[in-house]
Amino acid sequence: MEQNIYGIMAEFDTPTELVDAARQVRDAGYTKTDAFSPFPLHEIDEALGIKRSILPYLIFAGGVTGLLSGLGLVYFVHVFDYPIIVGGRPHFSLPAFIPPVYELTILFAALVAVFGMLFLNGLPAPYHPVFNVPRFAFATREKFFLIIEAKDPKVRLRREHEVLWKA
């Protein structure tokens, strides 16, 4: 029976109760936790011990890759593949190539941002086990939920029930 249990979930009426309970759960040593709220709670990341995402670094790397690939593309085309002297300028005249290089920088950074966010968030995920809880429908309107997943190495379901009951 315990193999089919996803975790233990607690319901709260106010965001303060949720944040306090999340801190208690984190202080108790649980790492596989999640919180659900009808609106963003900026304190919940710190309360659950969620670390900063690596997505900004990935986006920066995507932008640098776009910049370098744009420079490489215009350099190859105008110096090796199709060298034409226009208006007495050299084959590689950087001011003329700023727009395409800029556009490739933005394109690569945007693509990394979209697909990186989808990958890091585990999306698309049309099903989640918490949808089986009938009261979870209130998570989008007025209630706040905290879950400790059964995959957490510290989980013993009786103890979690006691920890969440005290919160």
Image (tube, helix red, strand yellow):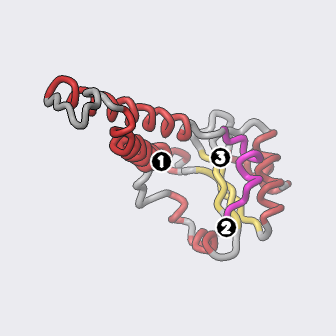
* Residue density around tag 2, few if under 14, some if 14–19, many if 20 or more, within 10 Å: few
Q: Between disc 1 and disc 3, whose residue precedes?
A: 3
How packed mark 1 is, by other alpha carbons closer than 10 Å (few <14, some 14-19, many 20 or more), is: some
Task: Determine which of the numbered discs, if any, sits on residue 117 in the image.
Answer: 1
Q: Main secondary structure of the magenta part?
A: loop
Residue span colored magenta: 38-51
Are the residues at dot 1 and dot 3 in contact (C-beta closer than 8 Å)? no
**Which numbered dot is residue 39?**
2
- Quick one: SS at disc 3? strand
Q: Quadrant of residue 30?
A: top right
Q: In this image, 95 relative to 29: left or right?
A: left
Specify the quadrant of the image occupied by residue 135: bottom right
Number of residues whose C-alpha sits closer than 10 Å to that of mark 3, classed few (under 14), some (14–19) or many (20 or more): many
Which quadrant, please, contains the C terminus?
A: bottom right
Identify which residue, 165 or 122, lies in the foreground.
Answer: 122
Residue 107: x, y in percent?
37, 46
- Give the residue type that dot 1 points to: Met
Measuring from the top left, give residue 77's x and y in whole percent.
20, 31
Q: Look at 41% across and 60% down and name the residue there.
A: 126
Give residue 33's mark.
3
